[in-house]
Image (cartoon, rainbow, N blue to C red):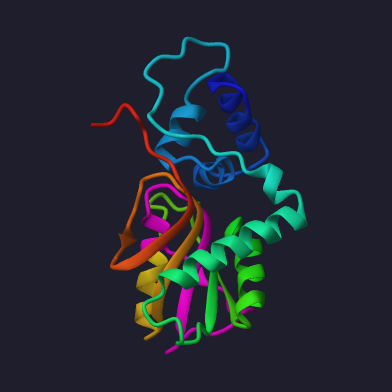
């Protein structure tokens, strides 16, 4: 997308195809507040006071299994470097659905670990109530890393951490392709990002 009008048009198209605001936010890699703003505007109307957010399009990576594998390998290396006791085996890689799952799958293969999938429930008004899918590995009592494509506000990752801790699992690191907020850690778990975006207009 070249500009904000293109982004508004895409958000409206996604809404017409049946996606909720939360799903649109995930698909466009923007905050939920930005998705709400996009849906409230017309691409041909007067656009003022656009939200301060950063649109991320990583489809050039996502549409190529080779590129995705290379990025996942680099992220795996970065995450492994950040773990306090690298000798401790990571038992489960938890991928945040939808976009974090392919990356998590490749990292799990590289680490010879099991795969778990967190499904967010962003259709609800509060955007909470996600769960770990029963079709993948159990996490109870296991050492885990969390993998997603983009971290925007950190709320989804916080939810994953909470669920893992409730199951006596040990979240040791968070790996993301892009960190839009500059997190060093979330809930005490270190964040490892290949790219960290910083706004130059912030003090």
Image position, residue 23 (x, y; %) = 55, 47
- Does the magenta segment cover residue 150? yes
The one nearer the camera, 106 or 160, is 106
Residue at image coords 61%, 70%: 107
Give the farthest residue toward the bottom: 141
Magenta part of the chain: 129-158
Question: Please, is residue 23 above or below residue 90 in the view?
Answer: above
Residue at image coords 23%, 31%: 203
Question: Please, is residue 3 above or below residue 31 in the view?
Answer: above
Where's the N terminus, which quadrant?
Answer: top right
Q: Which quadrant of the structure image shows residue 75?
A: bottom right
- Does the magenta segment cover residue 177? no
Image position, residue 126 (x, y; %) = 37, 52
Q: Which quadrant of the structure image shows residue 198?
A: top left
Residue at image coords 53%, 80%: 92
Image position, residue 118 (x, y; %) = 52, 68
Q: Which quadrant of the structure image shows residue 187?
A: bottom left
Residue at image coords 37%, 18%: 49
Question: Please, is residue 66 above or below residue 43 in the view?
Answer: below
Question: Please, is residue 86 above or below residue 194 in the view?
Answer: below
Give the farthest residue toward the left: 203
The one nearer the camera, 145 or 110, is 110
The one nearer the camera, 42 or 155, is 155
Q: State the count of labels.
A: 0
Image position, residue 82 (x, y; %) = 41, 69
């Amino acid at each position: 997308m070249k500009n904000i009008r293109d982004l508004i048009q895409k958000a409206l198209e996604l809404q017409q195809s049946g996606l909720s605001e939360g799903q649109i936010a995930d698909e466009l890699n923007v905050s939920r507040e930005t998705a709400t703003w996009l849906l409230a505007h017309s691409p041909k109307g007067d656009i003022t006071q656009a939200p301060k957010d950063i649109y991320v399009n990583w489809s050039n990576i996502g549409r190529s299994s080779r590129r995705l594998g290379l990025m996942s390998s680099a992220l795996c290396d970065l995450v492994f470097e950040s773990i306090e006791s690298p000798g401790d085996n990571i038992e489960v890689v938890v991928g945040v659905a939808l976009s974090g799952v392919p990356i998590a799958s490749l990292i799990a293969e590289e680490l010879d670990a099991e795969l778990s999938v967190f499904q967010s429930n962003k259709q609800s008004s509060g955007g909470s109530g996600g769960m770990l899918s029963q079709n993948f590995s159990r996490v109870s009592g296991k050492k885990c890393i969390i993998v997603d494509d983009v971290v925007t506000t950190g709320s989804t990752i916080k939810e994953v951490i909470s669920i893992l801790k409730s199951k006596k699992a040990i979240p040791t690191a968070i790996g993301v392709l892009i960190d839009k907020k500059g997190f060093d850690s979330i809930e005490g778990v270190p964040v490892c990002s290949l790219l960290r975006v910083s706004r130059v207009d912030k003090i």
